[in-house]
Image: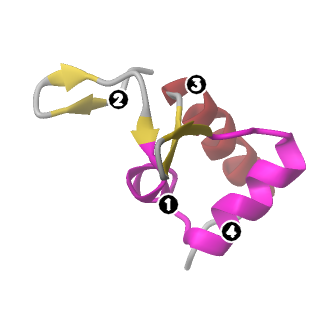
Amino acid sequence: MPIIKNGVAVRNVRIRDAQTYVGCGHSRIYDVMKILGVKPKKLGRSSSLSPEQCDQIADFLENQGGGES
């Protein structure tokens, strides 16, 4: 599903925005990324994920019952 920000579909989602999108914190998103083998894209000093990678992480958390409570 495309991620819309300011009315525009984005190609890359910053890690902080991805945390909000998938509903988990900093440590948990990196743990899940490691489990799934998802590698963030580096743009200068910032890291970002594609919307497909965000969906993959969200599906994993949904199936595991993860996320912050």
**In the image, is 36 to the left or to the right of 5?**
right
Question: What segment carries the magenta color?
Answer: 14-40
Looking at the rendered structure, the kind of residue marked 2 is Ile
Residue shown at 62% from the left, 32% from the top: 53
Q: Which residue is mark 1?
A: 23
Quarter of the picture holding the N terminus: top left
Q: Which numbered dot is residue 3?
A: 2
Crowding near the residue tagged with mark 4, few <14, some 14–19, many ≥20 C-alpha atoms within 10 Å: some
Looking at the rendered structure, the kind of residue marked 1 is Gly
The picture places residue 35, in percent across and down from the top left corner, at 88, 51
Q: Which residue is mark 4?
A: 28
Looking at the rendered structure, the kind of residue marked 3 is Glu
In 3D space, how far apart are the residues under numbered discs 4 and 1 (Cα atoms)? 10 Å
The picture places residue 52, in percent across and down from the top left corner, at 58, 24
Q: Which of disc 3 and disc 1 is earlier in sequence?
A: 1
Q: Which of disc 1 and disc 4 is earlier in sequence?
A: 1
Q: Nearer the viewer, residue 25 or 46?
A: 46
